[in-house]
Amino acid sequence: MRHFFGLLLGVVVAAAVLLGGGWASQEAVRGAAQGVDPAKDTRMLIALGVMAVVGLLLGLVLVGRVSPLATFIPSMALLAWTVVYVLDVSRAASLVPTGPSVQAELLQAGRGMLMLLSTGVYGLLGVALFLPVLMPSRWARPESDEEQEEEYEESFGF
């Protein structure tokens, strides 16, 4: 059951990194290009908040005692997209939501995703998210309090 919830959490993390991070990065670039003061522009403040929430989510998944699937799913999505980008840029760009029927915010998130992909940020995040998968202790079930107490009592001969 722990790995099922890890799988669901991995899908949420992947969506947050791709959509939230893409939109926030594009908004931050827009603000920097226009010389917008973040304290006076609410969209810039929201973008900074989204970046903070995505960073907090990534940090909690990386160091928390959750299933390694929570980091494996987004790492594979990010690394696979990076490999596709390296092999065929036009095919990787075709995976981004574009077109006249796409909502403006989603279109902006797509542009941000392309920017993060082309600068290598997704490759970097993919490798960082893959490292917890390699730790065997993340795959094992956490010891219950009863098991820890029994080990303690056995070590002292009680």
Image (cartoon, rainbow, N blue to C red):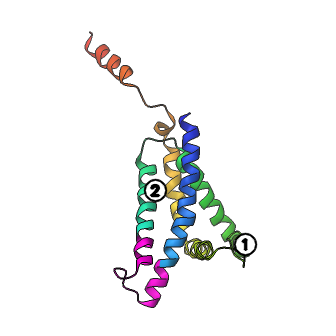
Q: How far separated are the C-alphas under marks 1 and 2?
A: 26 Å
Q: Which residues are magenta?
A: 28-48
Q: Is residue 107 left or right of residue 70?
A: right
Q: Residue at x 43, y 41 (%)?
A: 65
Q: Residue at x 50, y 74 (%)?
A: 25
Q: Quadrant of residue 88?
A: bottom right
Residue placed under numbered mark 2 in the picture? 58
Q: Residue at x 46, y 50 (%)?
A: 61
Closer to the N terminus: mark 1 or mark 2?
2
Residue placed under numbered mark 1 in the picture? 94
* Picture coordinates of residue 6, whole percent (x, y): 54, 43
Seen in the picture, residue 37 relative to 107 is either above or below; the reply is: below
Identify residue type, mark 2: Leu
* Picture coordinates of residue 7, whole percent (x, y): 58, 44
Q: Residue at x 27, y 10 (%)?
A: 157
Q: Secondary structure at mark 2?
A: helix
Seen in the picture, residue 13 relative to 139 is either above or below; the reply is: below
The question of residue 55 being in magenta is answered with no
Q: Residues within 10 Å of mark 1 (few under 14, many from 20)?
A: few
Q: Is residue 59 left or right of residue 76?
A: left
In the picture, which quadrant includes the C terminus?
A: top left
18 or 134, which is in the foreground?
A: 18
Identify residue type, mark 1: Ser
